[in-house]
Amino acid sequence: MYVRDAVLLTTTPPSRTRLYRLLDQKSVTEVIPYNLGPLLATAAQREGAAQWIDELHRHGARVIVPIAAAQRVKALDLLFAEHPDTWIDGMVTELEYWNRPDRAAALEEHMLLLATMRTTAATWGHDGDTMPIGAYLGYPTEAEAARLAAAIDFAFVDYSVNDPARAWGWKRGKDSLRRRFGWLANAGVEVWPIFYANGEVDMLAALKARGTGVAEAEFRSDQAADPDYGSLAPAGFIYFTFEAMPDPR
């Protein structure tokens, strides 16, 4: 579950309590918090951020931090130096290179950011584990997907549809998202579809009416029936965002 505004959530007790309840119920397992910057600016704020991350862990969460630039990695490095008992469970890029007019140059920035994340994360291991590195992805080409797959452990992939029944077979122009799934999953990347409760296109009405379980079952069923990619499966599902999501049915 993406959290749109970590600062607002941490200062709003009812929202924080609701998130913890969902974690305790195992309705949510991953927390991906946006707007962490203000929580990392000073030593006092980093102490508060560390306490919140620790609290998320006590409720069973895995905390995946979105990374748009190397400065965020540096800020996290400082936080962990100051609070060595605090950890996160992964990092995911938020650099949308496919939307840039200088796509080739932007992809190189993305690959460099992934390399920085990988190198720094190697110094942050928790309980002997290597921290996984991932990418939020929209619409890579097959060649781009091959490069990315060699650099990441998991991918959160965009499905901007208003009906779960359209998700598996959805196309964006000529881009078949089933092929995107196959390129990544066949390369050993864990693939997590993103379902949107808000956005330019979202499935909020369907999620309210039928719940997340139906949405996920529809995707899995459609994929299982695919003659080319039926043997693959998503690692899980990501929702955007916590603030917009209805309670589980």
Image (tube, rainbow, N blue to C red):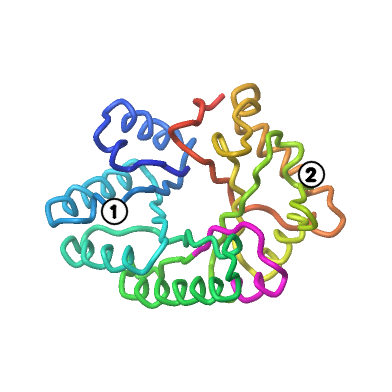
Q: Residue furthest left?
A: 44
Residue at the image point whose x is 49% and y is 62% from the top: 95
Q: Is residue 96 above or below residue 17?
A: below
Label 1: state its secondary structure. Answer: helix
Q: Earlier in the sequence, mark 1 or mark 2?
A: 1
Residue at the image point whose x is 40% and y is 51% from the top: 62
Position of 60 with respect to 221 (left or right) is left
Disc number for residue 37: 1
Residue at the image point whose x is 39% and y is 68% from the top: 129
For disc 1, the neighbor class at 10 Å (few under 14, some 14 to 19, many from 20) is some
The verdict on residue 145 being magenta is: yes
Q: Position of residue 120 (x, y in %)?
A: 34, 74
CA distance separating discs 1 and 2? 39 Å
Q: Quadrant of residue 19?
A: top left
Position of 15 with respect to 39 (left or right) is right
Q: Which residue is mark 2?
A: 222
Position of 18 with respect to 234 (left or right) is left
Q: Amino acid at mark 2?
A: Asp
The verdict on residue 216 being magenta is: no
Q: Is residue 25 above or below residue 134?
A: above
Q: Residue furthest right?
A: 227
Tags 1 and 2 in contact by the CB under 8 Å rule? no
Judge by depth and name the residue closer to the eye, 217 or 100: 100
What stretch of residues is rendered in magenta?
134-149
Q: Nearer the viewer, mark 1 or mark 2?
A: 1
Q: Amino acid at mark 1?
A: Gly
Q: Position of residue 32 (x, y in %)?
A: 42, 49
